[in-house]
Image: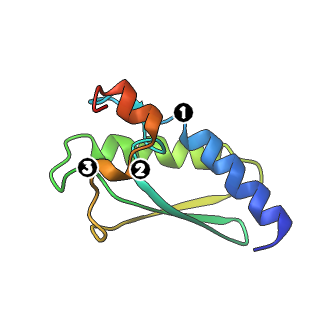
Amino acid sequence: MTENEEKVVQAVLANLKEVIDPELGVDIVDLGLIYEIKIEAKVCTVEMTLTTMGCPVGELLASNIKAAVLAVEGIDECKIDLVWSPAWSMDRMSLEAKIALGVI
């Protein structure tokens, strides 16, 4: 990854930290829903999961993710790759998310 691509990835991550799961009130990065961010040319692919397969806010999150990613300078397209493996678990959450949700 080039230095410029790394800067774009960091900008994407910063914007994704502003995307809040409306059911849990915690951002999707700290929840551990984002697995990987790939940059190719001006296309950003976000590999992610949801807390459950039947997550009722999945479409809303996808829409908010695309808006957050497209707000980053140098990104013209956002693709979301929704994966179920590895399965999400609370172990993926950051310390901040665990505290916010009262898990620890």
Secondary element under disc 2, as helix, strand or loop, is loop
Q: Quadrant of residue 53?
A: bottom left
Q: Who is closer to the viewer here, 26 or 12?
A: 26
Which color mode does the image show? rainbow
- Considering only order in the chain, which callout, 3 or 1, is on the residue closer to the N terminus? 1
40 sits to left or right of 64: right
Q: Quadrant of the C terminus?
A: top left
Q: CA distance from mark 1 to mark 3?
A: 18 Å
Say few, some or many: other residues with alpha carbon within 10 Å of mark 3 (under 14 / 14 to 19 / 20 or more). Answer: some
Seen in the picture, residue 103 relative to 79 is either above or below; the reply is: above
Choose mark 1 or mark 3, whichever is in front: 3
Q: At 28% from the left edge and 32% from the top edge, which residue is drawn?
A: 103
20 sits to left or right of 76: left
Secondary element under disc 1, as helix, strand or loop, is loop
Check disc 3 and give the amino acid type: Thr
29 sits to left or right of 104: right
The reply to whether residue 20 is in sight is: no
Q: Quadrant of the N terminus?
A: bottom right
Q: At 60% from the left edge and 49% from the top edge, which residue is drawn?
A: 69
Instruction: Find residue 79 and report its horizontal and vertical position in percent.
Output: 50, 63
Q: CA distance from mark 2 to mark 1?
A: 14 Å
Q: Is there CB contact under 8 Å for labels 2 and 1?
A: no
Q: Residue furthest left?
A: 54
Give me the disc on residue 18.
1
Circle 2 sits on which residue?
32
Q: Residue furthest right?
A: 3
Seen in the picture, residue 42 relative to 60 is either above or below; the reply is: below
Q: Is there CB contact under 8 Å for labels 1 and 3?
A: no
Circle 3 sits on which residue?
51
Check disc 1 and give the amino acid type: Glu
Check disc 2 and give the amino acid type: Gly
Say few, some or many: other residues with alpha carbon within 10 Å of mark 2 (under 14 / 14 to 19 / 20 or more). Answer: many
